[in-house]
Image (cartoon, rainbow, N blue to C red):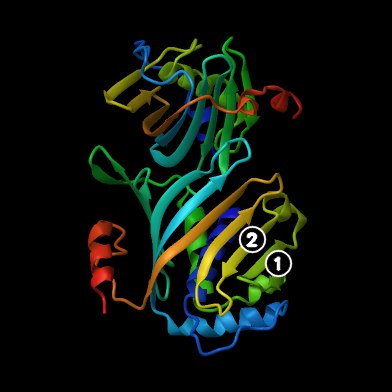
Amino acid sequence: MCLLAGCAVTKLPPTQSLPPPAGLFPANALLTQRALFTARGRQFALNGYLALSETDGKRLIVTENFGNVMADLLVKPDGRVFVLRSSRMFPERYIRRLMAADVACIFGGAPTLDCPVTMPETNHFVLDRGGYKLDLRIVGTKPGIQPAAMFDETAALKK
Amino acid sequence: MKITTYLLGLMLAFKAAAATNEVAPPPAANSPVVLQDLQQKMASVKTVYLEFTQERVLKLFSEPLKTEGVMLIARPDKIRWETTAPYQSILLGDQKTVAQFEFNDGKWEKLKLGFPQLLQRVMQQMALMNQGKLDALMVDYTITVTTGELTVLTMVPKDANVRGMMSSLEVHLLPDLSATKQVVMNEPNGDLMRITFRNEKRDMEFPEKTFDQSKPLDIAAVQAAVKNAP
């Protein structure tokens, strides 16, 4: 099976940075997302659940149509990345290098790559890296402090 | 395997809907009899409409992650699984082909599927089950039945590798098997998927293009037809 994201990105297009406007998202919240991931002409509909913590970082869980977890990523405020679960569709090296950068591009942080993001409308983001394209919509926002366990990197270190 | 088992549970829900009220509930813990009873009732139902709430329960989250939708099935092999909230998405399948649509930018877009073969395989298995071939269940699963307020079929995969992904599948039915209330897929780490069904309707005629894989009929039109069905 082709590791679509990992093998598709060999060269990044000319970039333009678009840091997200401040205050787009609550500092502490759970965001529910629906995304279309396109690579090599094929499209994958995915769900994303992103927990935001002002002090503890960001935790993203990506599932496919039937709820199977395809990726589980923790990004600490200092930029450290922990991959808690990967899959054949999203291998660890893709999550660590690209998915973490995409999260920082759209939701804030210190992206390690450029941010080729546009925002066609409120809560709708399109990130196009050439090798793949992510069309992401926020479909639910629940403000509030998230459980501390979500941002516990020791769970990743125990793996 | 996990997706197949998930949809197997949905098909059992469909099949259970075929039960009549004339047959007494089966004896407890007699799983071959229960399956046989379900299988016998399969032939009588031609179409089913069900609304559902799907909850993904991950221990990490303080609340389940919910979606709402509808499921439509028409013999022998047509299925439409539509999520209506918090986003809109349609999965369609029959024995030969599958299609997925996403509602984006105010219109429906048909996706160029990444792994159509996988979905296709699942749909083909569903078609077989739709024809009443549940015997394979006994080969792959250890099945127990408990009775009480609800009759619960608990299916535990015999294969250790499969059990590593899914510890069990539960189908919760009314005691007389006349309706399925819930399907639960349990994972070894305590996470689970729970689908709760409601507003079931049977044997109505679905409008044309309900299962069309090029331009499916809008669900509101389908629901209006279902509502007005005799």
Q: Nearer the viewer, residue A134 or A107?
A: A107
**Residue at (40%, 40%) from the top-left corner?**
A43
Residue B8 versus residue A16 in the image, above or below:
below
Identity of the amino acid at label 2? Leu
Nearest the camera: B209 or B37?
A: B37
Give the percent coordinates (x, y) of residue A107. 43, 19
Q: How many marks?
A: 2
Closer mark to the observer between disc 1 and disc 2 = 2
1 or 2: tag closer to the N-terminus: 1
Identify the subunit bearing mark 1: B
Which chain does the numbered disc 2 sit on? B
Residue A69, percent across and down?
57, 40
Residue B192, horizontal then vertical, whole percent: 61, 49
- Using the image, tell me which numbered label, if any, was put on residue A37: none
Q: Quadrant of the C terminus of chain A?
A: top right
State whether residue B108 is above or below residue A8: below
Q: Residue at coordinates 45% horizontally, 15% vertically from top-left? A: A108
Q: Give the secondary structure at mark 2.
A: strand
Q: Amino acid at mark 1?
A: Tyr
Q: Disc 1 designates what residue?
A: B141
Q: Quadrant of the N terminus of chain A?
A: top right
For the residues beneath circles 1 and 2, the answer to whether they share a chain is yes
Left or right of B65 on screen, residue B157: right
Q: Is residue B129 above or below residue A2?
A: below
Q: Which mark is residue B169?
A: 2
Is residue B12 positioned above or below B183 on the image?
below
Contact between labelled residues 2 and 1, with CB atoms less than 8 Å apart:
yes
A81 or B213, nearer to the observer: A81
Q: Is residue A10 visible?
A: no
Residue extending farthest to the front is B149
Secondary element at tag 1: strand
